[in-house]
Image (spheres, rainbow, N blue to C red):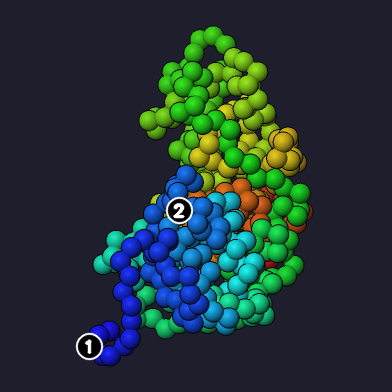
């Protein structure tokens, strides 16, 4: 900057505590992405609680913006949803305008020389009331063109949770959500490292013993149990608390909570049809017809299979990638997924077969939109 005559001031210190309390017209950030502890003494000086350093940097930058001032940051997409970032979203989306977003379709190509692990985006905020329309652009690789879509801000930002969901443009308005049709996603109740006294590699000879299911116990639409996957396969429900962790006989749909960055799919679902109580490990979500407090079996085997087919469609996988930069699929994400009616899902279930080709799944799902 000196060589081209740009006036500047260089400050050596912690940007979170020593950024001058002035008004700036432009703030440009490439912040660190590490987590920030809840007991970090710097939390007290921030405009809002920060789950990690990048949200802390943005909140400090926003707090220093002059009227109509703009901030641009290159950050992970994880701030857009999830409970950890609720305080940050309340501050950033409650007092400032989110004007534009750019999404990188291929992290491995665009950031291949930087060892970036997160899915990354550019975001632009300004110090004014929320603008009516938000420009969303996307590029696949370094040499590809840029696609641009303008969304109404009310379509992007949930007014209650302030979650930002970039749904596929032109999404059919006839679709409801999984939650609105009366289905409830929950998380598997058995946390293995907290249940060491109740989980076993070999089936105990005495007591109320039940199958313990992991993602590795599902293959081609069927449950394989017991299976040698390096995980305990049996759950002993020998007290009231352990018994409450069981899923009762019936029909359900399991959805993997975690995938690696480069896996082909983010959303992977399996039908569960059991005639005895089973235990579901915490790395799986499951969908039922009850509430968050009471699990109730889905109404039919066809409904479970139809929902499995729908959730395994490319349409849902792309929808989730658009609304979330995370590889973790949580229950709230599943509840918000677009979904046809119960009747249509049951009709899809009658077409479901184990080991269906992806092109067949997508063709059937397309007819239900």
Q: Which residue corresponds to mark 2?
A: 42
Can the viewer see residue 53 in this picture? yes
Residue ID at (58%, 36%)? 188
In the rendered image, which quarter is residue 76 located in?
bottom left
For residue 265, the mark is: none
Q: At which x and y percent is residue 41?
A: 45, 49
Local crowd at mark 1 within 10 Å, few (<14), some, or many (≥20)?
A: few
Q: At which x and y percent is residue 278?
A: 59, 28
Residue ID at (69%, 33%)? 250
In the rendered image, which quarter is residue 87 located in?
bottom right
Q: At which x and y percent is residue 301?
A: 69, 41
Quarter of the image with the C terminus is bottom right
Foreground: 80 or 266? 80
When the figure is inspected, residue 268 is found, relative to residue 320, above or below; the finding is above
Foreground: 227 or 207? 207
For residue 3, the mark is: 1
When the figure is inspected, residue 246 is found, relative to residue 332, above or below; the finding is above
Local crowd at mark 2 within 10 Å, few (<14), some, or many (≥20)?
A: some
Quarter of the image with the N terminus is bottom left
When the figure is inspected, residue 152 is found, relative to residue 59, above or below; the finding is below
In the rendered image, which quarter is residue 10 located in?
bottom left
N-terminal-most mark, 1 or 2:
1
Residue ID at (42%, 75%)? 28
Q: Secondary structure at mark 2?
A: helix
Outermost residue to the front: 21
Can the viewer see residue 74 in this picture? no
Q: Secondary structure at mark 1?
A: loop
Residue ID at (63%, 69%)? 95
Q: At which x and y percent is residue 190?
A: 54, 30
């Amino acid at each position: 900057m000196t060589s081209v005559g740009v006036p500047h001031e260089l400050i050596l210190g912690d940007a979170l505590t020593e950024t001058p309390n002035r008004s700036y017209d432009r703030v440009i950030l490439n912040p660190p992405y590490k987590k920030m502890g809840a007991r970090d003494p710097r939390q007290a000086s921030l405009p809002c609680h920060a789950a990690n350093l990048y949200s802390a940097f943005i909140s400090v930058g926003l707090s220093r913006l002059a009227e109509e001032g703009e901030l641009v940051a290159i950050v992970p997409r994880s701030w857009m949803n999830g409970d950890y970032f609720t305080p940050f979203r309340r501050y950033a989306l409650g007092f400032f305008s989110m004007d534009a977003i750019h999404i990188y379709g291929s992290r491995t190509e665009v950031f291949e020389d930087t060892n970036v692990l997160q899915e990354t985006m550019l975001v632009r905020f300004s110090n004014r009331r929320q603008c009516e329309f938000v420009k969303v652009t996307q590029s696949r690789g370094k040499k590809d063109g840029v696609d641009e879509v303008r969304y109404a801000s009310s379509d992007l930002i949930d007014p209650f949770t302030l979650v930002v969901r970039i749904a596929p443009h032109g999404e059919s308005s006839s679709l409801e959500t999984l939650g609105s049709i009366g289905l409830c996603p929950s998380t598997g109740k058995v946390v293995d490292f907290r249940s060491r006294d109740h989980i076993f590699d070999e089936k105990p000879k005495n007591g109320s013993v039940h199958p313990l299911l992991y993602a590795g116990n599902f293959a081609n639409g069927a449950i394989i149990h017991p299976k040698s996957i390096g995980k305990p396969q049996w759950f002993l429900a020998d007290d009231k608390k352990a018994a409450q962790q069981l899923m009762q006989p019936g029909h359900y749909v399991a959805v993997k909570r975690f995938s690696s960055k480069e896996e082909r799919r983010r959303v992977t679902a399996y039908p569960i049809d059991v005639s005895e109580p089973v235990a579901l490990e915490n790395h799986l979500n499951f969908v039922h017809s009850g509430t968050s407090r009471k699990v109730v079996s889905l109404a039919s085997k066809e409904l479970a299979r139809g929902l499995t087919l729908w959730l395994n469609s490319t349409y849902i996988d792309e929808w989730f990638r658009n609304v979330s930069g995370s590889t973790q699929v949580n229950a709230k994400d599943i509840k918000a997924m677009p979904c046809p009616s119960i009747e249509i899902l049951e009709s899809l279930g009658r077409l479901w077969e184990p080991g269906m080709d992806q092109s067949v799944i997508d063709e059937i799902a397309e007819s239900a939109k």
